[in-house]
Amino acid sequence: SPHQGNLLEVKNLVMQFGGLKALNKVNLCVAKGSVHGLIGPNGSGKSTMMNVLTGIYTPTEGTVRYNGQSLSGRPASEIALSGIARTFQNVQLFGEMTVIENVLVGLHHTFNANLVDVVFNSRRYHEEERKARERAAGILEFVGLASLANEEARNLPYGKQRLLEIGRALGLNPSLLLLDEPAAGIPPADLPELTDMIRKIRSHGITVILIEHHMDVVMGVSDNVSVLDFGQKIAEGTPDAVQKDPKVIEAYLGS
Ligand code: ADP
Ligand code: MG
């Protein structure tokens, strides 16, 4: 039965690609306000889960409930508007746009000015634009990129591009943020900063699902961790319990 404290409830999820079940009857509950780690060897189905949750893939079987409502059959654009934002395993930014413009793209849907305002260059349009820029600047401050606001995104080091992706996702004002390997490409010395940032995001009431290979990061910040192996959930619990679980150790040693 649905639990009041869960923001997300996934039941019996199957995602089949030809003969391969990338997800095989996965159940997943994510508590509101938590950081939920999702780990597993390469190819275990983690990114597929993100793609199902954001409506990029339509699951073969199973249900996803978010905030008590079914996401089944809803297009990706609608799911994004309902408050689920993500970053990608491979950074997807607008390289030729500036850093702040990339965040403004994320803010766009909260923009209230209509076409008439834009065409007639109205005060309301300028006011909305000013507010959006102010918010984007605040987000850049939050992710530590304020000094790079006017750089072209493609000129940023890869690790900073990842932070910008997080900023762009935050611009959507999400209730649920999905991070797909945010630490990949970030210099080891900067990982504590990333961990702190994820904690800060949680402290703003945003629920996070964190896919991550860096065990220090995922175990250091997650309230709960689920482990996938060959599309099936093989373990779940606190970081401590999961790290000691023989099934988990075997899955990683065998990969
Ligand atoms: P992870 O993110 O855990 O490394 P993925 O979710 O990317 O794993 O992939 C899980 C499995 O599903 C892999 O075997 C992968 O090759 C397969 N897969 C993922 N996406 C597709 C797709 N669009 N078409 C066919 N197979 C896919
Ligand atoms: Mg992946």
Image: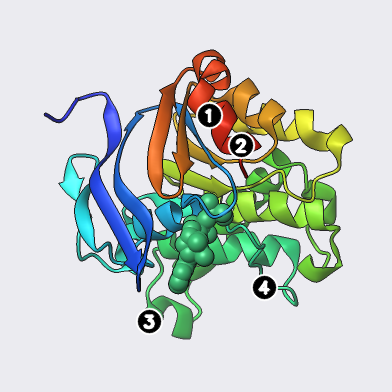
Residue holding disc 4: 94
Left or right of residue 193, residue 180 in this image: left
Residue type highlighted by circle 1: Val
Task: Tell me the distance, in whole angstroms, between the alpha carbons under discs 2 and 1.
Answer: 6 Å
Q: Quadrant of the C terminus?
A: top right
Which residue is depicted at the point 77% across and 28% down?
192
10 Å crowding of disc 3: few (<14), some (14-19), many (20+): few
Write the residue at 75% across / 57% down: 161
The residue where tag 2 is placed is: 252
Q: Position of residue 31 (x, y in %)?
A: 34, 27
Name which of mark 3 and mark 2 comes first in the sequence.
3
Query: Mark 3 and mark 4: span between their CA atoms?
Result: 27 Å
- Identify which amino acid the numbered label 3 is placed on: Val
Tell me the crowding category of disc 1: few under 14, some 14 to 19, or many 20 or more residues within 10 angstroms, Cα based. many
The mark found on residue 227 in the picture is none
- Image quadrant holding the N terminus, namely top left
Check if mark 2's residue and mark 4's residue have beta carbons within 8 Å: no
Q: Are marks 2 and 1 in contact (CB under 8 Å)?
A: yes
Toward the viewer: 109 or 203? 203
Question: Which of the two marks, 2 or 4, is nearer to us in this view?
Answer: 2
Tell us which disc is closer to us: 3 or 1.
Answer: 1
In the rendered structure, the answer to whether residue 66 lies left or right of residue 238 reads left
Q: Say which element carries label 4.
A: loop
Q: Quadrant of residue 3?
A: top left
The Cα–Cα distance between marks 3 and 2, rounded to whole angstroms, is: 57 Å
Residue identified by numbered label 3: 116
Q: CA distance from mark 3 to mark 1?
A: 57 Å
Q: Amino acid at mark 4?
A: Phe
Q: Is residue 87 above or below residue 69?
A: below
Looking at mark 4, is its residue's CB closer than 8 Å to ligand 2?
Answer: no
Q: Secondary structure at mark 2?
A: helix
